[in-house]
Image (spheres, rainbow, N blue to C red):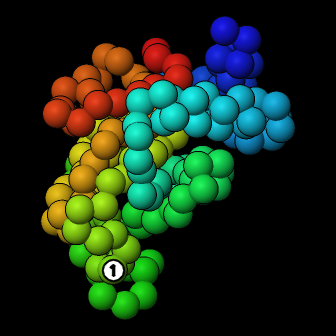
Amino acid sequence: EAKLQLVQRHVRAFPDFPKKGIVFRDICPILKDAAALKAVIDLFEEHVRNNHQHVDLIVGLDARGFLFGPLLAQRLGIGFVPVRKKGKLPGATVSVSYDLEYGKAEAEIQEDAVAPGQKVLLIDDLLATGGTLYAASELMRKQQAEVLGCMVVIELKELNGTDKLKPHRVFSLIQY
Ligand code: 5GP
């Protein structure tokens, strides 16, 4: 499909970043191209409208989930909630620690960000090991929100992130 090809053409690969042996997929060219960014949001919107009857909130991950999440939420006419790295959010928070593709981290949301029973979709730029999205799903579980699924622009297949996220389903635009 034309939109998907447009998105594909705006992802760059950087070998040995941020560490030797890792091929970093850079989504900045998507953001810089209005048509490519619109294509990403069009494809996400289409997926949500075809697969989910009702969504309360889009929950986006720090930091590149923030680039796509609010745009999608606006399209759908719903709100956006950020999952942040520890120590960034004011007020009462809930946190979980998790392993990254390279390192360790803690993810946090504001305690009143989601209400019990709310239906949410998780969004990030890229799925690698799944640790980050899994942490977000744990936060949702703690707050008794219902995760309808995960959405990413890029999925790195060989790291099996989709297994880690089961039973949650992952929708990705591009797979490597
Ligand atoms: P995971 O937790 O699935 O192992 O790693 C995914 C997280 O790390 C995402 O938040 C993503 O932004 C970041 N990440 C890891 N590798 C890459 C990459 O090659 N490109 C981009 N854009 N982000 C990456």
Which residue is found at the position 65% from the left and 17% from the top? 4
**Where the N terminus falls, by quadrant?**
top right
On screen, residue 46 above or below 91: above
| Residue placed furthest toward the top | 1
Residue marked by disc 1: 112
Q: Secondary structure at mark 1?
A: loop
Q: Nearer the viewer, residue 113 or 126?
A: 113
Q: Is residue 21 visible?
A: no
**Pointer 1 residue Cβ closer than 8 Å to ligand 1:** no
Q: Is residue 88 visible?
A: yes
Which residue is found at the position 51% from the left and 34% from the top? 49
Which residue is found at the position 42% from the left and 50% from the top? 55
On screen, residue 70 above or below 164: below
How many numbered discs, if any? 1
| Residue placed furthest toward the bottom | 91
Mark 1 burial class by Cα count in 10 Å: few <14, some 14-19, many 20+: few
The location of residue 58, given as percent across then percent down, is 46, 54
In terms of image quadrants, where is residue 156? top left
The location of residue 158, given as percent across then percent down, is 31, 17
Q: Is residue 163 left or right of residue 93?
A: left
Q: Is residue 54 left or right of residue 137?
A: right
The location of residue 28, given as percent across then percent down, is 70, 39
In terms of image quadrants, where is residue 155? top left
Q: Is residue 125 left or right of residue 96?
A: right
The location of residue 94, given as percent across then percent down, is 24, 75
On screen, residue 96 above or below 167: below
Q: Amino acid at mark 1?
A: Asp
